[in-house]
Image (cartoon, rainbow, N blue to C red):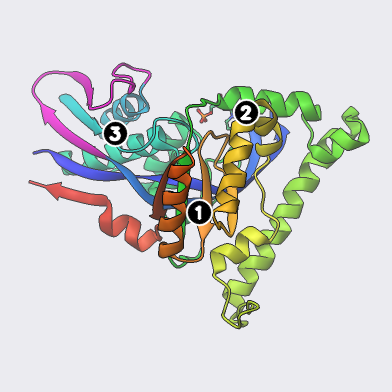
Amino acid sequence: MPVSVRSFAKINLGLRIGAAREDGFHELLTVYQTIGLHDLIRVSLGRGRGIEIQSTDPRVPKDESNTCHGIVKKAMQALNMKGRVLIHIEKRLPVQGGLGGASANAVAAMLALERVLKKALPTEERLRIAAEVGSDLPLFLLGGTVLGVGRGEQVYPLEDLPATACVVVTSEVGVSTPNAFGEWDRRTGGAGVSALVEGGSSKLTLPAASDRMSELGRGLSAWLSQSYSGAPRQISRRGRAENPLLELVRAGIENDFEPVVFPEYPELSEGKCALERAGAKYASLSGSGSTLYGLFASKKAARAAAERLKTEGWAAQATVTLTRREYWKKFLVSSF
Ligand code: C5P
């Protein structure tokens, strides 16, 4: 019987790029946050063999290059199951990068498949398979606020933070993630901004990269220790406890892709400014883009900002960040 699930998107609440590794990936430190925007994935099993992908959106690949194909093939093997898997993708998310749409689709397809088959993979196996398919898949096995390290595939759940209003802005621009990493390497000598300033000699390379990672690591540790120590939260100028998500992004968390992507695509830098002008408490590129987002003080402010941005010609959508609890509560649409 078919199973339908919601495949929620993510944003990156900051991202630091570390040293280039021998395997061609880069060390990363990032905080992922799932949001309410989603696609719908329906999985069913029929007679025969193979994997068939259908989608409402012609831009979604139907062949082996689709991450859903790769993950379902691995999951079928791991579960030692045979049959013809049909995956239907109702695209509601923008196809442009930064929201992890394709990665979320793949994880959703694997979890829906398990339900169709009435078989569950062990958690470690799910994480292994997801990481093999891509660096930003495993986060969708946790949902909520997630710390990502390694190449982004090692994931740790962070405290479930209250839902925060946000606005997502998409543009026609398509940013290639490998090219953005490549540009980062060219600009920094594979090092980091501090090495760029200091000349980028190979001796400076690794310390500079790890300095930047340590700096964010310290900011995150300070923020986490505040959450878990029971100490009162910072009080805003208006006398209210600060929203912990906003507190986090103010702790100096930035997206290292911005200085490499913005010069190449000035439109995206303008989009960030437009979000700030529309009242965002914090605005940033998500992942390597091209999606931008802004965090807002209230849902009302976010809705008003999305309307204003649309009149300025931006493709803007208001949504909320999704806590881990809500992510799983809303994950399953139906199972007949
Ligand atoms: O893992 P994923 O398929 O998302 O990565 C796409 C590409 O992005 C990789 O082939 C690599 O070039 C680059 N990448 C990287 N470092 C990471 C993640 C991705 O260099 N941590």
Q: Nearer the viewer, residue 290 or 138?
A: 290
Q: How many marks?
A: 3
Between disc 1 and disc 2, whose residue precedes? 1
Question: Ligand 1: does it lie within 8 Å of the C-beta at label 3?
Answer: no
Residue to which mark 2 is pinned: 265
Q: Amino acid at mark 3?
A: Lys
Q: Is residue 15 magenta?
A: no
Image spot of residue 178 (x, y percent):
59, 24
Rendered position, 298 above or below 94: below
Rendered position, 286 above or below 304: above
Residue 321 visible here: no
Q: Nearer the viewer, residue 39 or 122?
A: 39
Image spot of residue 104 (x, y percent):
37, 39
Residue to which mark 3 is pinned: 91
Packing grade of label 3 (10 A; few <14, some 14-19, many >=20) is many
Instruction: Tell me the SS state at disc 1.
Output: strand
- Give the residues in magenta: 40-65
Residue to which mark 1 is pinned: 146
Rendered position, 65 above or below 80: above
Q: Nearer the viewer, mark 1 or mark 2?
A: 2
Q: CA distance from mark 1 to mark 3?
A: 24 Å
Q: Nearer the viewer, residue 151 or 322?
A: 322
Residue 271 visible here: yes
